[in-house]
Image: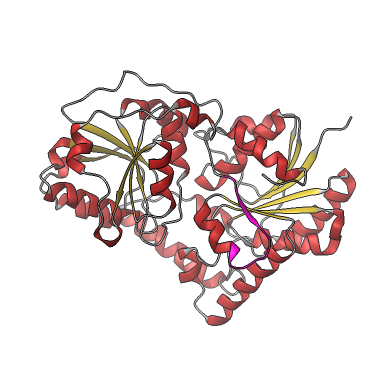
Amino acid sequence: MNNPSLVLIAFKYPPYSGVGAFRWSNLSKELAELGWIVHVVTVQWNCRSDSSFLDILNHKNIIIHILPSLGPHRMTEWRAYGGALGLAVRIFRRIVERLLSPFYYIDVAQQWGRIMIPFVKNLLVTTGCNVLVATGAPFSVNHAAARIKTELGDRVRLIQDFRDPWNDLPSYVTSFGSARRRANSEKMEHESLACADAVITVTKGVARLFQERTEQVVQVIYNGYPSNLVSKLRNSPKLRPLIRVVYAGTFSHGRDKTFIKFLLMLQNQRLSGKIIFDIYGAPSKFLRQAVRSLQNPDSVSFQDRVNYENLMNIIPDYDYGLHLNGRLSIDALSTKIFDYLAVGIPVLSVNYGDEIHGFLTENGFGYSVRLDNGQQEVDLAELIEKKPVRPDPGRVAAFSYRNIALQYIKILEGGGM
């Protein structure tokens, strides 16, 4: 009996080590372990020694096909530098983006389809595979997959996997520069949804946005955590003189402003000296300046960047893992939430309501501080005075990528959840 198979179009895939590769690097590995043959169509990324996903490249059931991107995709790998070098890098990127904008006015994958579409069509035919999955962003990938579906018809089952909203994503909204570009992107989104056999998103909030644009039932399969991550708590929960909080993530889409607003709340309640934050990420210049202006700036410590594996060994030493949502990204459930839970620490979320609030409180996964409409759902003094409540391992296990892969198989085989 032949193994079931699928073709995955994933612009971001290992050795790319950014968050855009987390979902499908883990899902493809779990599917391969469950006996699926996964053909991955992607582009070349520089191999970093700190990538924790390189073992995926050697799995016998994962076959990787690397195609030229026909675009400046590696600019997204450039690290954020400070000082004069950082300024020079940002200026150079802006110049390159401006020069290439007539050709890549939707996203960096826009021209990739010229090579990728005929390759994938041939791959589907020669392998006999009839399942095609496209994951975006970048969303030109999803549109290219729709073109393949249109040409091959019922010969292939198309699953559109959206890790983010499309034309509601802040970076897309602000980058078009003209009504014509915006209209073109909206047309691409409509066409991508219209011919899909299944539409998958990562949160209920994102699903609502896509549901407004299609009659297809949009289904939710959450992100999760690598199945080999297990609780690594050093000590049982206890009340400490200082609450220690770790943040591992970006400050994009207004998350830096959310963090500063929370720090000011603590300061106004005379609690900033009782909680300390260790930041493993790339803080914005705005954030660094705002922290320096606090009454107790030493409560926030910016740590050196560490790779994913080392970070997962550091996190269990903390009382809480911090999650931040910006005002324009209320639908986001960061992948880092699931990493915090996997290693056994509760989440402290500062957000503007919506799904994250219910997700944490209903599952007992942590605390939610809402900034919307002046509401404060959590008493900050109570948060600091109480010992942390560890998340229930049974509830957390539902979000291992092995269990998420089992959910996804139902979709791949033509059923529903």
Measured as percent of width and height from the top left, residue 414 is found at: 77, 47
Describe residue 47's horizontal placement relative to residue 392 as left or right.
right
* Residue 307 in sight here: no
Of all residues, the one furthest to the top in this rendering is 235
Query: What residue sits 83% from the left and 55% below the top?
Result: 121
Report the magenta stretch's main SS.
Answer: loop
Q: In the rendered structure, does residue 218 fall within the stretch colored magenta?
A: yes
Residue closer to the observer: 231 or 300: 231
Q: In the rendered structure, does residue 406 fall within the stretch colored magenta?
A: no
Describe residue 245's horizontal placement relative to residue 13 as left or right.
left
- Residue 405 placement: quadrant: top right
Magenta extent: 211-221
* Residue 187 in sight here: yes
Q: Quadrant of the N terminus?
A: top right
Describe residue 8's horizontal placement relative to residue 260 as left or right.
right
Of all residues, the one furthest to the front in this rendering is 362
Query: What residue sits 84% from the left and 45% below the top?
Result: 129
